[in-house]
Each structure stands twice: as C-alpha cells, then as structure tokens.
Image (cartoon, coloured by chain):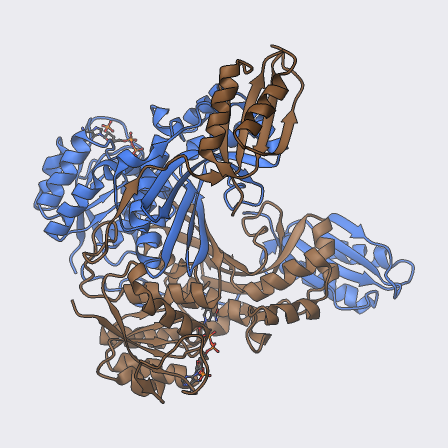
Chain colours: A brown, B blue
Amino acid sequence: MGPLRIGIAGLGHVGCGLIELVQRQDRLRLPGRVEIAGVSARSQSRNRPVSTDGYTWFDDAATLAEDPNVDVFVELVGGSDGPAKFAVESALRAGKHVVTANKALIAKHGNMLAALAAEKQVDLLFEAAVAGGIPVVRVLRDSLAGTEVTRVSGILNGTCNFITSTMLDTGRSYEDVLEEAQKRGYAEADPTLDVSGMDAAHKAAILSAIAFSADLDFSKVSVRGIEDIGLLDLRLADRLGFRIKLIAEGVLKAEGVVCRVEPMALTAGHALARIDGSLNSVRVEGDPLGAVVLTGPGAGSGPTASAVMGDVAKLFRPAIRNAFGRADHHVAQPFIKGGEDEISPFFLRVRLTDKPGTLAALTEALAEEGVSVDKLLQDSADETGASPVAVVTHRCPRRQILSAIARIEALGVTVDAPRLIRIETAS
Amino acid sequence: MGPLRIGIAGLGHVGCGLIELVQRQDRLRLPGRVEIAGVSARSQSRNRPVSTDGYTWFDDAATLAEDPNVDVFVELVGGSDGPAKFAVESALRAGKHVVTANKALIAKHGNMLAALAAEKQVDLLFEAAVAGGIPVVRVLRDSLAGTEVTRVSGILNGTCNFITSTMLDTGRSYEDVLEEAQKRGYAEADPTLDVSGMDAAHKAAILSAIAFSADLDFSKVSVRGIEDIGLLDLRLADRLGFRIKLIAEGVLKAEGVVCRVEPMALTAGHALARIDGSLNSVRVEGDPLGAVVLTGPGAGSGPTASAVMGDVAKLFRPAIRNAFGRADHHVAQPFIKGGEDEISPFFLRVRLTDKPGTLAALTEALAEEGVSVDKLLQDSADETGASPVAVVTHRCPRRQILSAIARIEALGVTVDAPRLIRIETAS
Ligand SMILES: NC(=O)c1ccc[n+]([C@@H]2O[C@H](COP(=O)([O-])OP(=O)(O)OC[C@H]3O[C@@H](n4cnc5c(N)ncnc54)[C@H](OP(=O)(O)O)[C@@H]3O)[C@@H](O)[C@H]2O)c1
Ligand SMILES: NC(=O)c1ccc[n+]([C@@H]2O[C@H](COP(=O)([O-])OP(=O)(O)OC[C@H]3O[C@@H](n4cnc5c(N)ncnc54)[C@H](OP(=O)(O)O)[C@@H]3O)[C@@H](O)[C@H]2O)c1
C-alpha cells in the first residue's frame, strides 16, 4: 500500500500540531504511512514551532486542495466562509477526501458540503471540530448508531467554563479572568465567539445533526452566552447548591430538534456540574443506552491534532488492520508481568494484637525496610481487642513494603493478614 | 442495497435486548435494514422477554454460524471455550463477519481469532465485550489511532464497584451487598468472575492489546479482586481521604505492556474516585492527547445490545451514509426554534432597590403569574444599597416566569436586569 498523501492548509496551532504528529507517526497506530504532499498558510516566512522547510509550499490553499499529489485535503485555516470554504469545496469537487477542524464552516455549510462529498463519493470528516480531543463525533455517528439518541448536552467551550469556574473559585471579576483565559491560549483571538456562546452553538448544532439525523439549520439555534453572568450570580447559585455553566444541548421533540446554548444552573449531582477549568464534557442520552459521558481536553494544539490524525487514519484504503487495530507494519508489544519494583505511595491496613509495643513494632518494621510514613491513623480497639491501624506511606518500591509486611507478620503482632493497596494520586 | 442478515446465538439478556432493537430499528440510525436470519439458544421452549417465534430456529449455534443465509454471526452465548468458541471459529472459517460481547473468549483466544478473521478478510468486532454501553473499543482502536496511548485505566466491573461503594455508603457487609448486586442483576450467575477481578482482567487485557498494539497474552495479567477488602479498610481509607476501588490498568513500559487488576486507593481528586454504583469508567492517557474519560453503563441488556448493534451497523457494505451519518432512507428531522413553553425549575437573580416593600412586590409578581417559590435567599444590601435576591422556583413554563419578570421590571423595584437561568436537576 502506498502512502496516504495529505495537503495541509493552515499552519497555526492545529496545523503545526499535525505536522509534529506526522513527523513521529511511527509511534502512532496508523494503518499505513502518511506523507505531506504540500502545505499552505498566509505567510511562508512566519516563524513556526515546527520546521516546514521540507514540504512543498502553496501560496493558495485551493491550489493545494486540487493538486494531483494530494489524496486528502486537511483544512486548518478556520472561518465559516472565505478561503477555508473555497478550498474545501475545491477539494471535494476535485474528488479528494477532506478533514477539517472548522466548526464554523461545518455549522454553516455542513449540509451543502456533505451533499457535495456524497455526490463525489469522498469522505468529509470533522472529529476535531467538536470538543477537540474528545472523539464524540465518531462515537455519536458510528458507535451509537444502534441506539436512539434522545438528548445531547455538554460543556463545549473551554473558555467559558474556565471563566465561570475560576470566577467562583477565586472571586475574581469576569474581565480579569477572561484576560487570563486569553493569556493561557484558551480564548480565541476575538473572544466574542467564545463568550457569546457562538462557538458552543456551532458544536451543538453539529452534534444535533448527527445525533438526530437532522438537517442542520443554524438559524434555528438559540444562543445566549455568559457575558451577563456576574460573580454575584455564581455565588448566590453556589449558596443554593447550583453550579452555573454554559451548557449546549440538542433535544429531540415530536416536531423536530431543539438546539440551544445558554447558562444553566446545575444541581451538584449533575454529570456536568463538576467539570471545571478548560475541560469539555459531552453527555449523550439514549434508549436503550442510558447515558454516556465523555470528558477531556476540548482544545489545544496537541489534542486537536490528535483528533485530526484519527480522521486521517480512517482514510487509508484498504484499511488493513486486524481486529485489535494492528497493521502488519506495527511491531507487536509483548505483555509482560508487572514486577515488584513499581514505585508508589501505599495504603496499608493492619489490625494489631492487644499487647503493648505492637504499634512500635509496626513502625520499626517499616523504618527498617526504608518505608517512610506519611500518615498513620490508629483507631480504638474493636470488640476483640485488636486495634485497626491505617498507614499511608511515602513513595517506595512495592518490594520494600512487601518486605516490611513480611517482617510484621513474622513478629506476630497482627491478628489478620495486612491489606496492602496502591495509592493513585494522579487523575 | 439488500438487508444485512444476522444470525443470533444466545437469547439471554443481551440476545433478547438485541432482538428488541432489531424490531424497532426504524428509530435507529443504521445504514440499511437488518434482518434476523436465524436464532439459537439452549432451550427453544424457554420463556423470553421478546417473542422469537417468527425467526428460524437452530438447535446448534455452529450450524447457524455457517448457514448460507447469514452474513453476520452474532455470538451472545458466553464462555471462553465450548460452544461460543466453536461457533465463532465456524463463522469466521465460513467467511462471515462476527460480532460478539464475549470478553472471556476474546481475552483468551483473541489473537487466534483475529488472525483467522484477517486471513478470511472478515471483521471480528467486540465493542460490547468491554464496558457494555461505553464505546471504548472503537474509540481506542480508531478514533485515537492518531495519538500515542501511554496508559489505559478504569473501573470495568460494575459489580465490584457497586459493592465497594455501597459498603462504604451504607456500612453493610460484603456478603450482604454482594447478595443485593446479584438480585439487581449486576453480578454474574457465578459472581466469582466479578469479585475475583477476572472479568475486569479480561476487559483490561483487550483494551491493552488495542491501545499498545500488543500481542494479547492473558497469562501475564496480574489479577487481584475485592474479596479481602472489608468495611474497615474502606472506612479507614475514607478517613484518610481515599476511595478504594477495583482498578484495571494497562501501562506501556520500555519492555512491554504491564496489565493488572487490583484494588487501589484513589485520592479524592482522581478522575475515577467519584464513579460510584454500577457505573463503568475508562480513562485513556496519551500523547499529545492528554486524558479522555468515558463513563457510562458497563452492563445491562439495553446498553450492551446497543453496543452490539453499533458493531452490526459497521458491517453494511457499502455503508452509504453522509458526513453526518444519515442514510438515504432516514427521514431528516428539522431543526426548530425552542419555544417558551419549556417547563423547568428556574434560578432567578434580581437586585432590589433600597425601598420598603420591594421583596413583597417581587414575591407577589411571581405569585400572580402562578410561579411558586421553592427557595429564596436575600442577602444583605451591597454598597449601593441594593439587595441581591436569588429565587429558586418550582417547575413552571418559561413563559410564566418571563411574564413575572416583565411585571417586576415594570414595577421599577430592581436596579439591573434580572438574570433568569434554567435549572437542570437530572444528571
Ligand atoms: N486551536 C484549537 O485549540 C482548536 C481546537 C479545535 C478546532 N480548532 C479549529 O482549527 C482551525 C485552526 O485553528 P488554529 O487554532 O490552528 O488557528 P491559527 O493558529 O489561527 O492558525 C490559522 C492558520 O491559518 C492560516 N491562514 C489564515 N488565512 C489563510 C489563508 N487565506 N490561506 C491560507 N492559510 C491561511 C494562518 O496562516 P499564518 O500562519 O501564515 O498566519 C495560520 O497558519 C480553526 O477552524 C479552529 O476553529 C482549533
Ligand atoms: N449481561 C450483560 O450485561 C453483559 C454485558 C457485557 C457483555 N456480556 C456478555 O454477553 C454474553 C451473553 O451474556 P448474557 O448476560 O446475555 O448471558 P445469559 O443471559 O446467561 O444468556 C446466555 C444465552 O446463551 C444460551 N446458551 C447457553 N449455552 C448455549 C449453547 N450451548 N448453545 C447455544 N446457546 C447457548 C442460553 O440459552 P437459554 O436461554 O436457552 O438458556 C442463553 O440464551 C456473555 O459473553 C457476556 O459476558 C453481557
């Protein structure tokens, strides 16, 4: 199988992220090789985080889209109209598959572009357009094709979520936190798209069209942003047990699909209430599925490029991978037995016998094996006279604490087998 | 395009759930029609929740698997060996696609079966085998093919999670809660597979094989269950800030893949710490992805059948659906504008002017429009003399509370525009 030749228009955050991924594609699980047939952006001379020197430069994105050496056109320019739309249409008309991260384009012209792609029998893929690294487009479209979706809702704009959650946590003002979101690179250059709810609305409309087999009509989407939400609102809601968040949703009613974006007050137990910071999260409710929630990074050059590459991976024909997704060129990793050299903090529970000095024996045994104690809790003796003790250790090799346990057991100071449980702190 | 003809072996929880879905397939988003070419189970006369009278009966699953009228063989019998394995092999050898929910079979014989499927150029799909309704198999295999996965971890056995979380919440004993899990249908008939960690290990091994392009070798998986976790352990851990949960994980190391299942103590902030009850949750960590978490129903006839149907949907050739997943036979839903007839509880924030009687004016306006108040919080006046008031209403049509707001504004008792925010309680 020859390589899949992609043309990349747009060499900003996502475009450069994609090039970086192409350059280390051997570590990914692609069905075959990806080759960059050409690149295009506004300025050839601009300094970029990856070198693009080795790639054929095109001044014009549409020329790249139509180039005979391009199998797949990847549009990472942005904007619902203008050069992005023109180049995508050119690519489709020329019979090329298109991968895009452009939610504004798909929300506004998705119907027309999907029809053009169907006519030309090529794929138009846009996983990265909704919720960045969270693979919700394909989950909804393909994995959940066997369930009747009744509602899709989610936190689809990381900037708004960062603003509302940081305001509440820190007591800082809207303007102040928005500025931080811009500095951190969450917000668009023009943050109006974010805070007006428009960006979330684009994404909600795309998800609704997929979930409900609906004809996307962006003019029917109700959009309200977070501009008029103040610290006072967030705080009063918090005192009454609610979290105010910008929620995008699509609901199937008898007459059609109602899609809307607005701040909502979520009760503490709501699946989306604890999604804080710049995370995105999408909840899909269906029958007979119940509800599935997908949470992850909704933007950022890495996660978004990863989604774009996932779409590119779909376009290899034939896609020769086995049932586990392994292609012939992938070196199979072996399964190996985990050893006892694993380093971690541990939780250890023992029940000490009803004799003096047993606690000292326990702590000495730990010390002698070099296991240092972070926390220790001894509870009052139970009805048998045994004292439950819980120890939280600092990080140490599992081997060391196993030796300490062997020592403790040999001393006969415990009434039953100690329970050793690894502690996981990362999340 | 003719219908896709499936043969279903196993008419238990999942098999009957699938038949129910086939019978209402018009409400799903399948690329074409699914027809049941035959069914098989142990006893033809057994009473089942759906009628199977109209379908051709096969006494033997392998005969069904090889039947010339069958395009796709769906194995829902269970067991790593015996009739399930024999029938799946027969189907693959006969050049039929196979869909299965059988994690024990795939964990033990997945390599051999994948090789056989590749040789025969047919698909072997097993989305339902891992985490029931959560589409993690295809997400890992396809959507995340463009990211380098470094760790997969999760809560993959609902019975164990139900037991540990219910014990802690209610103070009941292990035996007592296990019995409830069995009554609720979470536990397998022989719950040893659950509580020993074996079921979670099957699933973790499958996910690891996909995530790391690894040769599945179940003999290398370390398995420890929850049998020796007592209420004392859960409580002491809780007092020290940890949640003990049965965690399955696969990690990529330099020498290969370490896959293990064991109880772990998670800090409160860990993504999996708050997954309670019978839910499943899978966290995938990758570069440059970051981390994505998928949460949902890990078992149950509906969610599992929905996953099986998602796999069946993949087998239509050619799969004529547009970019939004819509096939020609799907009736397109229209997008419609959301009205003001929506019924919900609402959160309303006003700032009342510094005059006597303004609170009474507010509550009267609400009462006159038929909006009844669930909670009301008036805070001390701010530096301008205005009093912030938050109202939580009972459920009412949006129209009604909008009228109340219009009334309040007309009275001139507020110093700025009231903020109306819908409350979402369901999660
Ligand atoms: N950033 C994210 O986290 C994220 C997440 C999801 C989706 N997206 C979407 O991904 C797309 C790209 O976003 P981004 O953040 O990478 O944007 P960006 O950093 O602003 O990059 C835009 C790129 O487009 C190029 N460009 C502008 N006008 C052009 C034209 N007329 N012809 C050819 N190239 C042109 C720019 O060229 P110069 O470099 O020469 O200026 C730049 O390389 C957008 O649709 C966005 O909505 C982004
Ligand atoms: N239940 C879940 O929530 C769930 C979730 C994920 C995956 N799974 C997997 O799905 C599979 C089916 O589970 P289930 O819960 O539906 O099991 P189940 O309710 O016990 O049903 C098993 C079915 O297999 C039939 N069967 C048994 N031996 C057979 C044989 N020799 N030939 C033909 N049919 C035979 C039984 O026939 P009779 O009806 O005549 O007794 C029954 O219909 C298993 O692999 C399981 O691990 C289940």
Residue B28 in view of the camera:
no
> Residue placed at 66% from the left, 55% from the top?
B346
Out of A197 and A339, give the one closest to the viewer. A339
Q: Is residue A100 visible?
A: yes
Q: Is residue A46 left or right of residue A170?
A: left
Quick one: which residue is furthest to the bottom in this view? Answer: A59
x, y percent for residue A207: 43, 63
Image quarter for residue B334?
bottom left
Q: Quadrant of ligand 1?
A: bottom left
Whole-percent x, y for residue A62 in the image = 33, 86
Q: Is residue B191 above or below residue A27?
A: above
Name which residue lies at 26% across and 35% down: B51
Residue drawn at point x = 56 percent, y = 41 percent: B267
Looking at the rendering, in which quadrant would you find the N terminus of chain A? bottom left
Q: Which residue lies most toward the front here?
A: A368
Q: Residue furthest right?
A: B356
Q: Quadrant of residue A392?
A: top right
